């Protein structure tokens, strides 16, 4: 070839046998020989039974159900010892192989059932669905055309037996296959979690979802939060799938007063190392102990979930059944995923499935390349390089039930259950077509019935049947009822000895309060004990305290403040304290209202005893003075100051002291009226008597200087009318008081803690102050007249004593007013009694004590001779 090419070229300037040309030829030959040797070495080092996306398992039948299952996944491994680079290769996903077994199990079960599709056998055609779109696209085109080289709108298959396809569990796989098969109206049944996008008949006209919408999942999870009183919960949601679930969950949380501690929306992919650190720190630093995780396992969320076994210990994860296998860590005694709570859609148990798994071996299914690869990995079964079949009978070496559950779980998963139902849905649809013979174009070919696959769509939309587990199955989204959930508790023991325990159920169709049923004693928490973890933003406010929201934070974050005085809270986390009724008071802890005791200024009270004793003593003392005056009524001292007025004043003071006793003891309507009326009238008599005595003193002096007119006024007895007139005016005020708003018995519930004080309400405050004002006017008049007559030159002039007595009287009542208004309860009553006693005692002491002193102690001054000597001395002083 080189020679021919050289001859075709123009002649070279150098000779043909040039050494440079020879050297170039030898170099090229050496290069190609070296490359050939490397290729041979590579071929000898790599087995011929390679993983391929075109691997499939086919079992013939009258009608075939195709399945596209994610049986292969990428796995990384180091290239060589000491090398930092990694090698990415295909690897069989042992957990997902349960989907294939569920498909085969259902088809064989149907083929054995003489009542379902009689005389018709079902087969299967299983392909692997790639994790990337290009892998799945290549795979489905290979299935549609039957050739490695694709020709659009053409197929090289001689006979089309496939009636429907099954795929899942992720949204990406389902939407990709749904798009392709929708072009041909090819029925596609998906077994992954419910996806609202796949329900669009415009985009996916022939896609049927086996899973029911998780319309009550959010309610179930929030009910679990409320049951355990978790009000501080973190949310980790897949950005591509969980937006609608997040809105439903947050709405339920707000309705049940459960707060969102944080929300992490994890992107599907393309996240940086910095973003990873942010997500990790948010979960690590937050105080929330409960985290809800929702999304696809093969998205970015799955990557984070694997990391959190190291960075997020001792959290309680609440998730769905598709995350079960991710919680299986093999190297920790109690890892961070121990105690995970899993919401799994409730379905009946297929009792024969586990028995079927035990007999699934390569010898029973020799054409199953996926099963052979499992035996190669886990049971050291050598495969033929050419046919990828076991070179020896190694079925006895193992069984799928021997594998740890995190590699293969013999219990039927939710996805496998949906695969099982999908096969039965197709079988029931074909059975209905066969029995009713609705398709008039069906042809009998080689003893087999053949129907166009697109004809199944009309029946699949309305198919409804009872599966062997007793569950009702329908593919019509509008007829799917609320889903009942089993709540599983994941126990992860050393070396992957995990165990899922059913600890409760959630039934949304039951009445509120009965929807959630839990067996708490069965739950193992991440801490390794049975003590329920606490996840709250703030500790509970104990009884006696109320919540005060922290500014700028969620309503679950609050401070606890004691209830105000006389208010209580008898529960935890009370928003507002409740005020006790007026007849009750709060205990010291402010958790209960206690009945107040009724009290008043009684004679048993020390203060009442003291005041009553003082009043009686003063009353007796006044009576003694009255007796002294009566006994010495003919002495000059008694006669000089009008003995009648003195007797009247002493008697009124006795009644004044006795009047104070009406304020002591349990009040009633009679005593309340008598208190004020007696006080007003008796004191009016006393003060008007003092006024009369003062005027008498002035007139007595004027007799000696002014002549007959004053003497006639004094002798006419006109001064006797001062007391009745003044008293009558006060009686009018008291009558008006009683007629408008008389005093009455009242209760003071605020003055003293824990007590209701019985006292007399004045009724009309205006009338009360009118009575006091009138007394004050009389007192000021008496004080003024006495003050002006204090220096009159009379032998027994008592004007000075009257001045002092009125000064004391007015001082007491002027002091009484502010003190009275500043006190409450029994003290207020005691102040009023004390004012009565003090003012009366002031009158008694200032007016009568000096006279008694002369009568008893200085009788020498109580004689006519002494009076003449005193008179002569006074005239002498006046003349000078």
Image (cartoon, helix red, strand yellow):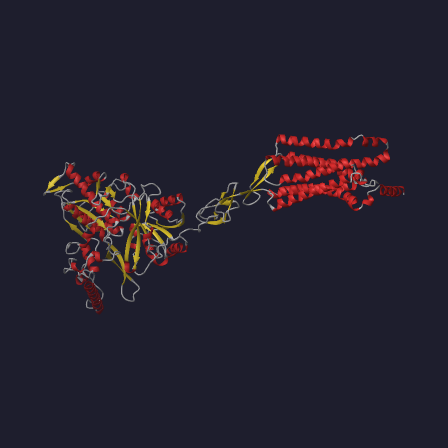
Q: Tell me: residue 461, above or below residue 149.
A: above
Indicate left or right for 157 with 513 as reference. Answer: left
Residue 86, percent across and down? 29, 61
Q: Residue furthest front?
A: 631
Residue 301, percent across and down? 33, 52
Indicate left or right for 377 with 686 as reference. Answer: left
Give me the residue at 62% from left, 42% from top: 828
Q: Quadrant of the C terminus?
A: top right
Give me the residue at 79% from left, 44% from top: 854
Q: Nearer the viewer, residue 87 or 456?
A: 456
Q: Nearer the viewer, residue 599 or 68?
A: 599
Q: Nearer the viewer, residue 159 or 536?
A: 536
Q: Nearer the viewer, residue 229 or 420?
A: 229
Q: How many marks?
A: 0
Q: Tell me: residue 782, above or below residue 537.
A: above
Residue 362, percent across and down? 16, 56
Residue 35, percent across and down? 21, 64
Q: Residue furthest bottom?
A: 19
Indicate left or right for 681 with 480 as reference. Answer: right
Q: Quadrant of the N terminus?
A: bottom left
Q: Tell me: residue 438, above or below residue 516.
A: above
Q: Is residue 598 visible?
A: yes
Q: Is residue 814 visible?
A: no
């Amino acid at each position: 070839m080189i020679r021919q090419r050289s001859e075709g070229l123009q002649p070279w300037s150098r000779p043909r046998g040039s050494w440079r040309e020879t050297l170039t030829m030898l170099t090229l030959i050496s290069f190609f020989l070296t490359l050939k040797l490397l290729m041979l070495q590579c071929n000898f080092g790599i087995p011929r039974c390679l993983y391929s996306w075109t691997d499939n398992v086919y079992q013939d039948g009258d009608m075939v159900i195709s399945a596209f299952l994610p049986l292969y996944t990428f796995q990384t491994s180091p290239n060589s010892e000491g090398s930092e680079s990694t090698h990415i290769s295909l690897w069989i996903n042992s957990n997902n192989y349960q989907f294939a077994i569920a498909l085969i199990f259902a088809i064989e079960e149907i083929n054995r059932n003489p009542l379902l599709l009689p005389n018709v056998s079902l087969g299967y055609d299983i392909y692997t669905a790639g994790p990337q779109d290009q892998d799945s696209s290549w795979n489905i085109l290979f299935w549609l055309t039957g050739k490695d080289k694709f020709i659009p709108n053409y197929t090289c298959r001689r006979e089309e037996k496939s009636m429907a396809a099954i795929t899942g569990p992720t949204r990406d796989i389902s939407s990709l296959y749904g798009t392709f098969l929708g072009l041909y109206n090819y029925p596609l049944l998906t077994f992954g979690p419910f996806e609202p996008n796949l329900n669009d008949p415009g985009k996916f006209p022939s896609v049927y979802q086996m899973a029911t919408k998780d319309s009550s999942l959010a309610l179930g999870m929030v009910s679990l939060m409320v049951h355990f009183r978790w009000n501080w919960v973190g949310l980790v949601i897949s950005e591509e799938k969980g937006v609608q679930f997040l809105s439903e969950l947050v709405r339920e949380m707000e309705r049940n007063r459960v707060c969102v501690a944080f929300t992490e929306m994890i992107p599907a992919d393309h996240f940086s190392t910095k973003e990873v650190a942010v997500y990790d720190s948010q979960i690590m630093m937050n105080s929330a102990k409960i985290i809800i995780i929702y999304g696809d396992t093969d998205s970015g969320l799955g990557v984070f979930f694997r990391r959190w076994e190291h960075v997020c210990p001792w959290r309680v994860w609440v998730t769905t059944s598709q995350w079960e296998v991710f919680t299986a860590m093999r190297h920790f005694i109690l890892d961070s995923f121990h105690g995970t709570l899993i919401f799994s859609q409730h379905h009946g148990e297929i009792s024969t499935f586990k028995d079927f798994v035990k007999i699934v071996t390569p010898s029973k299914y020799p054409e199953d390349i996926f099963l052979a690869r499992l035996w190669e990995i886990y049971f050291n079964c050598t495969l033929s390089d050419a046919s990828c079949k076991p070179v020896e009978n190694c079925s006895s070496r193992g069984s799928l039930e021997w594998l740890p559950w995190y590699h293969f779980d013999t219990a039927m998963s939710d996805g496998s259950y949906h695969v099982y139902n999908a096969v039965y849905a197709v079988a029931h649809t074909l059975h209905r077509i066969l029995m009713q013979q609705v398709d008039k174009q069906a042809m009998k070919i080689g003893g087999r019935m053949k129907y166009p696959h697109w004809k199944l769509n009309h029946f699949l939309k309305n198919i409804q049947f009872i599966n062997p587990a007793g569950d009702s199955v329908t593919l019509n989204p509008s007829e799917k009822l609320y889903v009942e959930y089993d709540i599983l508790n994941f126990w992860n023991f050393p070396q992957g000895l995990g165990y899922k325990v059913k600890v409760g159920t959630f039934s949304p169709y039951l009445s509120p309060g009965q929807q959630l049923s839990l067996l708490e004693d069965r739950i193992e928490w991440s801490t390794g004990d049975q003590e329920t973890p606490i996840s709250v933003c703030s500790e509970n406010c104990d009884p006696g305290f109320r919540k005060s929201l922290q500014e700028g934070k969620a309503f679950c974050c609050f401070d606890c403040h004691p209830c105000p005085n006389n208010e209580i809270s008898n529960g935890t986390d009370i928003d507002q304290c409740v005020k006790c009724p007026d007849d009750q008071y709060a205990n010291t802890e402010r958790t209960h209202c206690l009945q107040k005791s009724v009290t008043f200024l009684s004679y048993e009270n020390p203060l009442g005893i003291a005041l009553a004793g003082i009043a009686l003593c003063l009353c007796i003392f006044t009576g003694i003075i009255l007796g002294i005056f009566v006994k010495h009524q003919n002495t000059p001292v008694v006669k000089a100051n009008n003995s009648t007025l003195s007797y009247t004043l002493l008697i009124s003071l006795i009644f004044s002291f006795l009047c104070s006793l009406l304020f002591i003891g349990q009040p009633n309507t009679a005593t309340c009226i008598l208190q004020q009326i007696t006080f007003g009238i008796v004191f009016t008599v006393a003060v008007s008597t003092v006024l009369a005595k003062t005027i008498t003193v002035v007139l007595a002096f004027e007799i000696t200087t002014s002549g007959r007119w004053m003497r006639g006024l004094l002798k006419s007895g006109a001064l006797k009318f001062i007391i009745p007139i003044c008293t009558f005016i006060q009686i009018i005020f008291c009558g008006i008081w009683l007629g408008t708003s008389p005093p009455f018995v009242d209760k003071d519930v605020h003055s003293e803690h824990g007590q209701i004080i019985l006292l007399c309400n004045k009724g009309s405050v205006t009338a009360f102050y009118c009575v006091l004002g009138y007394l004050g006017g009389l007192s000021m008049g008496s004080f003024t007249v006495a003050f002006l007559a204090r220096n009159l030159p009379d032998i027994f002039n008592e004007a000075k004593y009257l001045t002092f007595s009125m000064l004391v009287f007015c001082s007491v009542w002027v002091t009484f007013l502010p003190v009275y208004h500043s006190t409450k309860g029994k003290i207020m009553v005691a102040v009023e009694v004390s004012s009565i006693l003090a003012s009366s005692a002031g009158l008694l002491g200032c007016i009568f004590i000096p006279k008694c002193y002369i009568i008893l102690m200085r009788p020498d001054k109580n004689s006519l001779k002494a009076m003449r000597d005193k008179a002569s001395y006074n005239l002498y002083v006046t003349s000078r």
